[in-house]
Image (cartoon, grey):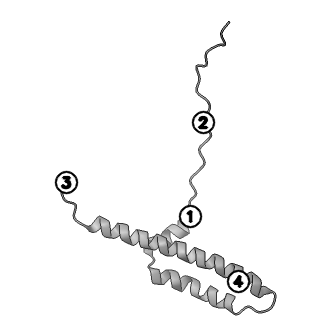
C-alpha cells in the first residue's frame, strides 16, 4: 500500500517584526558628514583622556565608536547620493 500523498505545504516560519530606530532615522535624514563627526567628538575626547585600568576599556569603546561613526557616515553618504540621483532629470530610454 503506498504512503498517503501530502497535500499541505510545510509551515513557513513566522515573520519577525522590522526593527525601528526613529532617533537614528531622524538624525540620518537631517545630518551631514560634519554633524556625524561633531556628534562623536566629545565622546572620543573623553575616552582618550582615560588613564589606568579604564584605559583598556576606553580603547574598546573607541573602536566601537569609530565603527558606529563609520556606519553613520556611510548612511549619510548614501542618503546624499539618493537625493542627488532623485534630482537628476529622467530621460526616456
Quadrant of the snapshot with the C terminus: bottom left
Q: In the rendered structure, which disc, 2 or 4, sits on the residue that comes first in sequence? A: 2
At label 4, counting other C-alpha atoms closer than 10 Å, the crowd grade (few under 14, some 14-19, many 20 or more) is some
Callout 1: SS: loop
Q: Which residue is mark 1?
A: 21
Pointer 3 residue: 93
Please tell me which residue lies in front, 77 or 43: 77
Toward which corner of the image does residue 13 lie, by quadrant? top right
Front label number (1 vs 3): 3
Give the residue drawn at x 19%, y 59%: 91
Instruction: Tell me the mark number nearer the camera, choosing from 1 and 2.
Output: 2
Sequence order check: which comes first, mark 3 or mark 2?
2
Q: Which residue is mark 4?
A: 59
User: Is label 3 or label 2 in front?
Assistant: 3
Residue at (60%, 79%) from the top-left corner? 66
Residue drawn where x is 52% and y is 84% of the image: 37
Label 3: how many residues lie within 10 Å, few (<14), some (14-19) or many (20+)?
Answer: few
**Inter-mark Cα distance, 2 to 4:** 44 Å
Q: Earlier in the sequence, mark 3 or mark 4?
A: 4
User: In the rendered view, would you say 67 is above or below 9?
Assistant: below
Of marks 1 and 2, which one's residue comes earlier in the chain?
Answer: 2
User: Which residue is the site of mark 2?
Assistant: 12
Q: Secondary structure at mark 4?
A: helix
Residue visible at 55% across and 83% down in the picture: 39
Q: Report the side of 18 relative to 79 (left or right).
A: right
Label 2 sits on a secondary structure element that is: loop
Tell me if mark 1 has few (under 14), some (14-19) or many (20+) residues whose alpha carbon lies within 10 angstroms of its own: few
In the image: residue 86, left or right of residue 30? left
Amino acid at each position: 500500500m503506498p504512503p498517503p500523498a501530502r497535500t499541505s505545504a510545510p509551515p513557513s516560519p513566522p515573520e519577525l517584526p522590522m526593527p525601528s530606530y526613529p532617533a537614528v532615522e531622524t538624525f540620518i535624514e537631517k545630518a551631514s558628514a560634519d554633524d556625524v563627526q561633531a556628534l562623536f567628538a566629545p565622546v572620543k575626547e573623553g575616552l582618550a583622556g582615560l588613564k589606568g585600568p579604564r584605559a583598556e576599556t576606553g580603547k574598546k569603546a573607541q573602536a566601537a565608536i569609530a565603527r558606529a561613526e563609520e556606519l553613520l557616515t556611510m548612511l549619510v553618504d548614501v542618503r546624499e547620493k539618493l537625493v542627488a540621483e532623485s534630482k537628476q532629470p529622467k530621460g526616456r530610454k
